[in-house]
């Protein structure tokens, strides 16, 4: 007759009952078979204790913990005697485990799995994956529970999900950047033709003042359009930069007056500058625009009621874990970073929108806001920096721009003088409007101009006219045979001819090696007459005849 359950203190574990029965039988009859069974039992017990997973034996339906292995004790931080003959629900979710163990499939003997939280002795929770199966012994049901700590698995899954989100975000930025860069490139080709023809028309002294005024207005509108394409290229990470060493605190101070007139007086601007900041290399005009965009964005986040906008500068050491929480963190190195931080007392950014705020034209206010923060992202990207967003609903937002200390070559500007020239120039560009206006400008400067619509045609003209050509204006982006391929062939034919690369993209860094080693200059589209003269004065002094008076 089986012994009934009569309380925690008198309830024996399954193992004790088996061993107790075995020892009594061995003393009375010394059966070798039972000795062998006991040895097997001890061997099995040893195997259970060597398992890395926690193993529990729970009586059904009372839920009393009858036995557990060493791994269970180790993971939970208890001694075995602290848990024996006590409710299993003490160390897990009691209601949920009771409901689970009462599941019809489990009671029918099927193996089932449940993810649940267990409680350590120090009250620390940790997630486990439980595999449960019911067994019967002497007409008593027992749940054999194998519990595996899945803390690291969950962390790995979260990291994987986070990485996937970052990859998708990076792909989205890359796709939008390619689109913005492509549109800006095409716009610059069109604007080259417009600005070139306007410049030529304005040099005609016979036109009346009314027509001259209208042309000047068209020229101003074209220059504004060119500024828009620069913002698009900045977002694409292809912006043009004239870099120089700058103290970030001094740069912000230089922007104070401009900031004060950019936002209404109901917004209070406060400044916290770290003195003696290390210098970093940046394009001052681009950073000025970034600061203005951030402050205007902060004022819009605060709303009509008004509030406080604070601009901070400083330095901080950034490790990999911190950089991983930022935008554009790929390929960034640990080390000292200079930061610019703009904080506001506004409504904060909802978590679901934080990955969208740098998308072009994204806004929660009203449509048509333009590139805004998207251009900020592009400028930071071109400066090899990153962005950290800290925001809570109703508590405001801090946007921190971080720039590493890196040194690069500082571009030198030359004085521009209009001059008269002679010589033969070859223009190679697949855009007909660019070829036409460039040819007219060159003739206006005194050159004889030839045009080619692609690289192969340009090479044929070079072979035919040979030493007559003193310079070649070569577009980088052309179908079939691009500018770089054409450049390599030109050098095989004539290694001394002057070559000027031109492009609707603004990023010189992409073609740095070719510009510095293989060519004599870079002409950015859209260009004006003065831009072309500036290059010719530098590379073709022998073609100079006389300065215009």
Image (tube, rainbow, N blue to C red):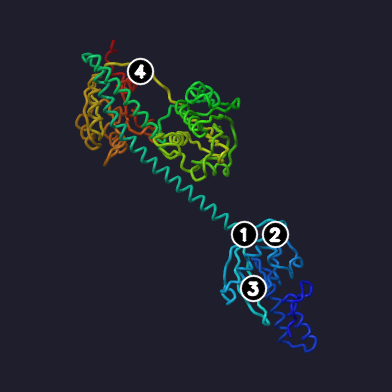
- Place of residue 279 in the rendered image (x, y in percent of width and height, measured from the top left): 54, 27
- In the image, taking residue 465 as reference, residue 227 lies left or right, namely right
Q: Residues within 10 Å of mark 1 (few under 14, many from 20)?
A: some
Mark 4, secondary structure of its residue:
loop
Of 364 and 12, nearer the camera is 364
Q: In which quadrant of the rendered view does residue 193 lie?
A: top left
The answer to whether the residue labelled 4 contacts the one labelled 2, judged by CB atoms less than 8 Å apart, is: no
Going from N to C along the chain, the mark reached first, 1 or 4, is: 1
The C terminus lies in which quarter of the figure? top left
| In front of the other: 5 or 469 | 5
- The residue that disc 4 covers is 416
Residue at position x 24%, y 26% from top?
437
Calculate the distance from the C-alpha at mark 3 to the C-alpha at mark 1.
20 Å
Residue identified by numbered label 2: 120
Rendered-image quadrant of the N terminus: bottom right
Residue picked out by circle 1: 127
Badge 2 marks a residue whose secondary structure is: loop
Quote the CA–CA distance across marks 1 and 4: 71 Å
């Amino acid at each position: 007759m089986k012994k009934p359950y009569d309380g925690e203190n008198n309830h024996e574990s399954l193992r004790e009952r088996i061993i107790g029965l075995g020892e009594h039988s061995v003393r009375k009859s010394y059966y070798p078979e039972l000795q062998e069974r006991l040895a097997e039992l001890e061997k099995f017990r040893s195997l259970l204790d060597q398992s890395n997973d926690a193993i529990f034996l729970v009586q059904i339906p009372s839920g009393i913990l009858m036995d557990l292995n060493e791994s269970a004790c180790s993971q939970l931080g208890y001694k075995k005697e602290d848990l024996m003959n006590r409710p299993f629900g003490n160390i897990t979710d009691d209601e949920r485990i009771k409901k689970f163990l009462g599941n019809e499939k489990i009671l029918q003997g099927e193996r089932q799995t449940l993810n649940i939280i267990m409680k350590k002795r120090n009250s620390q929770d940790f997630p486990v994956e439980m595999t449960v199966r019911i067994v019967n012994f002497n007409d008593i049901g027992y749940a054999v529970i194998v519990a595996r700590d899945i803390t690291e698995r969950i962390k790995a899954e979260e990291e994987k999900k986070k990485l996937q989100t970052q990859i998708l975000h990076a792909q989205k930025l890359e796709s939008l950047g390619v689109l913005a860069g492509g549109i800006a490139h095409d716009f610059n080709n069109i604007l080259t033709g417009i600005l070139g023809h306007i410049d030529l028309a304005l040099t005609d002294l016979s036109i009346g003042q009314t027509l001259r005024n209208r042309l000047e207005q068209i020229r101003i509108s074209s220059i504004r359009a060119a500024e828009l394409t620069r913002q698009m290229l900045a977002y694409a990470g292809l912006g043009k930069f004239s870099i120089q060493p700058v103290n970030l605190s001094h740069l912000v101070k230089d922007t104070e007056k401009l900031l004060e007139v950019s936002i209404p007086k109901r917004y209070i601007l406060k400044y916290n500058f770290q003195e003696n900041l290390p210098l970093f290399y940046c394009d001052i005009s681009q950073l000025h625009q970034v600061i203005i965009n951030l402050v205007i964005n902060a004022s819009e986040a605060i709303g009509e009621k008004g509030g406080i906008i604070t601009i901070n500068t400083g330095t901080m050491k950034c490790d990999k874990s911190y950089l991983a929480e930022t935008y554009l963190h790929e390929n960034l190195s640990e080390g000292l970073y200079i930061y610019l931080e703009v904080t506001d007392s506004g409504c904060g950014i909802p978590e679901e929108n934080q990955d969208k705020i740098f998308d072009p034209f994204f806004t929660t206010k009203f449509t048509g806001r333009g590139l805004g923060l998207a251009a900020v992202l592009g400028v930071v990207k071109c400066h090899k920096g990153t962005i950290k967003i800290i925001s809570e609903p109703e508590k405001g937002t801090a946007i921190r721009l971080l720039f590493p200390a890196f040194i690069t070559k500082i571009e030198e500007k030359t004085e521009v003088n209009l001059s008269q020239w002679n010589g033969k120039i070859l223009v190679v560009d697949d855009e007909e409007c660019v070829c036409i206006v460039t040819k007219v400008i060159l003739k206006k400067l005194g050159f004889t101009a030839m045009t080619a619509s692609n690289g192969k045609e340009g090479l044929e003209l070079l072979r035919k006219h040979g030493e007559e050509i003193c310079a070649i204006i070569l577009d980088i982006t052309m179908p079939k045979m691009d500018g770089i391929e054409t450049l390599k062939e030109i050098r095989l034919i004539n290694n001394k001819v002057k070559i000027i690369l031109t492009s609707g993209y603004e990023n010189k860094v992409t073609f740095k090696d070719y510009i510095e080693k293989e060519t004599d200059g870079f002409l950015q589209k859209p260009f004006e007459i003065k831009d072309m003269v500036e290059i010719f004065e530098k590379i073709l002094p022998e073609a100079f005849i006389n300065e215009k008076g």
